[in-house]
């Protein structure tokens, strides 16, 4: 017996929620794990496992007869490009998102308490979600009260839209005026409802199933070029090149405008960039912009950003010439600019080309950077961060946990009268200017930050007309490469037990912060822990040595006497570099000691490896707050702020994660995030949906004419 109950179309697939009755054992089974689907393109039927079942309902206290009443409490809908199943039980509606069609993986994103909405009648009030607003609120239909409500997940409160009783609702995203008069039966009676830009129809649409007018990006993207402008940081360049692969998959050509001013004197950077370019797909072309005369010095100290921003400003003209030099028949779909290179928006605005900034950081850091110029305003004056940092004050910033002032790029913002402060604030004030912001994160990993970024009230209206749309397209992480089996550390890992090795790597600039004394403390802590380890060591910067020798370490001189011999067999120290992605995904790796760079954090999350958090510079300190306090996938070492972490602290934190129950809880949480991240780019996943929206939005902004 098949009873059609709820129908929805998502990505050219029709999903049916139905009642399957089996009388062999007398008890009827209502199986939401038997959602039927019909692929309109392939013309194929298949069953889809649901997130709940009769056994789950009985585990929660329902007997089989009570489970029968669950049937009217189930609804299907579409939100943010995903199939959604809503399940009402005991005054609460759980909203489950299908994040991976192939594996049938569901994630519960909302649990909505409906007691405050039902006015005492709380038996069978199932919620049907209709649309997610730009500020993160949900428009829902409360069945069977006929109420149309706006639900705020941050406060768990509802606002009622005054429409009168509605027995059925469908969403129409076109113009209300384009509908025949007889179908315009309900007029929104409030400014809030009108702002939805939708028409509310009676059940006239209930039995209508039409194949969606699906945009074919491959056809639409023919002869379209997406230009990437990655700036000078290799940690930003790498994920942008991962994003380039997805553009290519959709049929776009990708042109990378590369500033290579530092390549000649920074061997490590040149090697890393060369390695990434060598692995690029044929449809990705790299163009080296002409060098400017007398380029500013970019040094490895806290004045580095001054040289960086000056370089970006002076490269606007070469960038403009490059954009104008593209083939006349090749129109630019959009330009994606590395976020610190925001001054390049002057060029894109002049040429009337859509432009998006790319943040290689997480969404939490983006929320901070967007609000940074305004969060400390007091009586029209921008106070110094120094006083607040000295008293270890924390700030309540929408979208993030309480943030210590010392973590907000403090070394650059201590003195409001300094050149560094003025330059930094000038750059951050431009963050709302692009057509949108692309972020290397997974939306479900950072729900608080993503909700804040979607709130149009995030930035003061007096200084910002709008908060740009945010597209979470992570994890942009390199796949294990062809280095496997070649680097000595991988062969060594093959001989180690599962999850037994502590991996230490502090990024390409780790030598800036780790002194010889600190390296010795790390070594002694590892030795005392008695755990296996793989440690990537770079030499500290020394004024006595030429810059070209920085990083290449003399291990015998840097490490304690006899350390290498005493730890031989259970430890391996490698110089300069190791294939981090392959190491983290190796079965033997059980812990990652990291500087909290976001690329490294994502690589650990996607590998399911817990972390010891040891931030060194820039937004790594903010990342640490998110990883330790919000996601709870790492522990913080004590002493990093004072400039020296003791051997005893290294040993204690290694033992905590590798030996204790708290370590097992960390491991379980990061495994959950790994599983969600694994499906973000699959069909129906949140990042793939956001990526498709990015392409669509950019196409709507793109002018018809090409550049001349």
Image: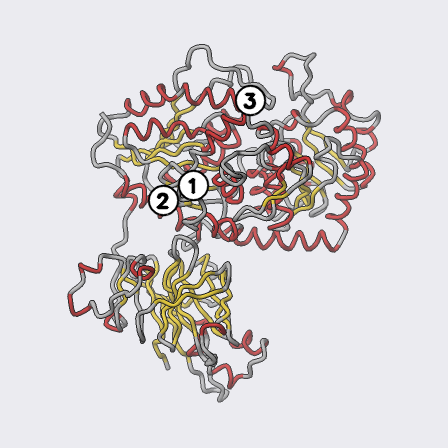
Say which element carries label 3. helix
Single out the mark in the foreground, 3 or 1.
Answer: 3
Q: Is residue 349 shown left or right of residue 101?
A: left
Q: Position of residue 153 (x, y in %)?
A: 48, 60
What x and y, as percent, mark residue 381? 52, 34
**Residue under label 1:** 438
SS at circle 1: strand
Residue at which label 3 appears:
304
For marks 3 and 2, give the CA distance. Answer: 32 Å
Give the x, y percent position of residue 180. Answer: 15, 65
Measured along the vertical axis of the image, is residue 456 above or below residue 525? Answer: below
Q: Nearer the viewer, residue 662 or 477?
A: 662
Q: How is the image coloured?
A: secondary structure
Q: Which residue is mark 2?
A: 694
Q: Residues within 10 Å of mark 3 (few under 14, many from 20)?
A: some
> Residue 431's quadrant in the figure?
top left
Find residue 506 and report its image quarter. Answer: top right
Note whether residue 401 is visible.
yes
Q: Quadrant of the N terminus?
A: bottom left
N-terminal-most mark, 3 or 1 = 3
Quadrant housing the C terminus: top left
- Sequence-earlier tag: 1 or 2: 1
The answer to whether residue 360 of the structure is visible from this angle is: no
């Amino acid at each position: 017996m098949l009873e059609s109950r709820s129908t929805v179309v998502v990505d050219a697939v029709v999903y049916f929620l139905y009642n399957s009755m089996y009388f062999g054992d007398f008890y009827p089974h209502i199986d939401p794990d038997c959602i039927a689907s019909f692929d309109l393109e392939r013309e194929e039927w298949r069953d889809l496992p649901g997130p709940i079942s009769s056994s789950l309902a009985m585990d929660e206290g329902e007997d089989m007869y009570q489970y029968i009443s669950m049937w009217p409490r189930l609804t299907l809908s579409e939100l943010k490009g995903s199939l959604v199943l809503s399940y009402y039980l005991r005054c609460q509606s759980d909203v489950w998102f299908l994040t991976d069609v192939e594996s049938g993986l569901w994630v519960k994103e909302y649990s909505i308490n409906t007691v405050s909405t039902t006015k005492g009648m709380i038996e069978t009030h199932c919620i049907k979600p209709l649309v997610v607003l730009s500020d993160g609120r949900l428009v829902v239909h409360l069945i069977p009260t006929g109420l149309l409500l706006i639900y705020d997940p941050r406060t768990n409160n509802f606002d009622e839209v005054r429409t009168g009783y509605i027995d059925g609702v469908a969403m129409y995203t076109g113009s209300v005026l384009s509908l025949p008069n007889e179908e315009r039966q309900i007029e929104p009676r409030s400014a809030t409802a009108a702002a939805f830009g939708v028409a509310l129809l009676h059940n006239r649409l209930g039995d209508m199933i039409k194949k969606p007018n699906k945009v074919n990006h491959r056809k639409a993207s023919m002869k379209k070029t997406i230009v990437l402008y990655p700036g000078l940081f290799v940690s930003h360049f790498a994920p942008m090149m991962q994003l380039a692969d997805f553009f290519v998959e959709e049929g776009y050509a990708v042109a990378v405008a590369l500033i290579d001013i530092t390549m000649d004197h920074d061997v490590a950077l040149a090697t890393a960039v060369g390695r990434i370019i060598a692995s690029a797909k044929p449809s990705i072309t790299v163009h080296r912009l002409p060098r400017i005369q007398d380029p500013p010095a970019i040094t490895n100290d806290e004045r580095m950003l001054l040289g960086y921003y000056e370089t970006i400003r002076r490269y606007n003209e070469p960038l403009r010439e490059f954009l104008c030099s593209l083939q006349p028949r090749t129109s630019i779909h959009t330009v994606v600019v590395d976020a610190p290179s925001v001054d390049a928006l002057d060029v894109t605005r002049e040429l009337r080309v859509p432009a998006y900034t790319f943040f290689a950081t997480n969404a939490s850091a983006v929320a901070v950077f967007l609000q940074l110029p305004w969060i400390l305003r007091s009586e029209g004056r921008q106070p110094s961060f120094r006083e607040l940092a000295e008293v270890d004050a924390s700030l309540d910033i929408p979208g993030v946990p309480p943030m210590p002032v010392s973590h907000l790029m403090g070394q650059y913002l201590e003195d409001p009268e300094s050149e560094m402060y003025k330059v930094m604030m000038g750059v951050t004030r431009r963050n709302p200017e692009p057509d949108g912001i692309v972020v290397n994160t997974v939306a479900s990993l950072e729900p608080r930050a993503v909700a804040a970024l979607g709130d149009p009230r995030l930035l003061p209206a007096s200084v910002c007309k709008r908060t740009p749309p945010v597209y979470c397209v992570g994890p942009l992480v390199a796949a294990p490469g062809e280095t496997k089996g070649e680097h000595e550390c991988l062969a060594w890992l093959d001989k180690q037990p599962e999850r037994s090795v502590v991996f230490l790597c502090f990024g390409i600039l780790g030598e800036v912060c780790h002194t010889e004394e600190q390296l010795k403390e790390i070594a002694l802590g590892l030795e005392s822990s008695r755990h296996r380890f793989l440690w990537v060591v770079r030499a500290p910067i020394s004024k006595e040595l030429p810059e070209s020798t920085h990083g290449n370490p003399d291990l015998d001189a840097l490490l304690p006497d006899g350390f290498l011999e005493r730890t031989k067999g259970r430890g391996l120290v490698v110089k300069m570099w190791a294939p981090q992605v392959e190491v983290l995904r190796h079965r033997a790796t059980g812990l990652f000691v990291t500087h909290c760079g976001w690329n490294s954090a994502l690589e650990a999350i996607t590998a399911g490896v817990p972390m010891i958090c040891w931030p060194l510079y820039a937004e790594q300190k903010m990342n640490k707050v998110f990883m330790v306090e919000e996601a709870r996938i790492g522990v913080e070492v004590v002493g990093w702020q004072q400039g020296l972490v003791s051997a005893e602290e290294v040993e204690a934190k290694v033992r905590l994660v590798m030996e204790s129950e708290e370590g097992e809880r960390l491991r379980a949480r990061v495994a959950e995030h790994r599983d969600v991240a694994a499906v973000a780019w699959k069909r129906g996943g949140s990042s793939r949906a956001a990526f498709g929206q990015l392409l669509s939005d950019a196409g709507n902004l793109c002018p018809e004419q090409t550049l001349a």
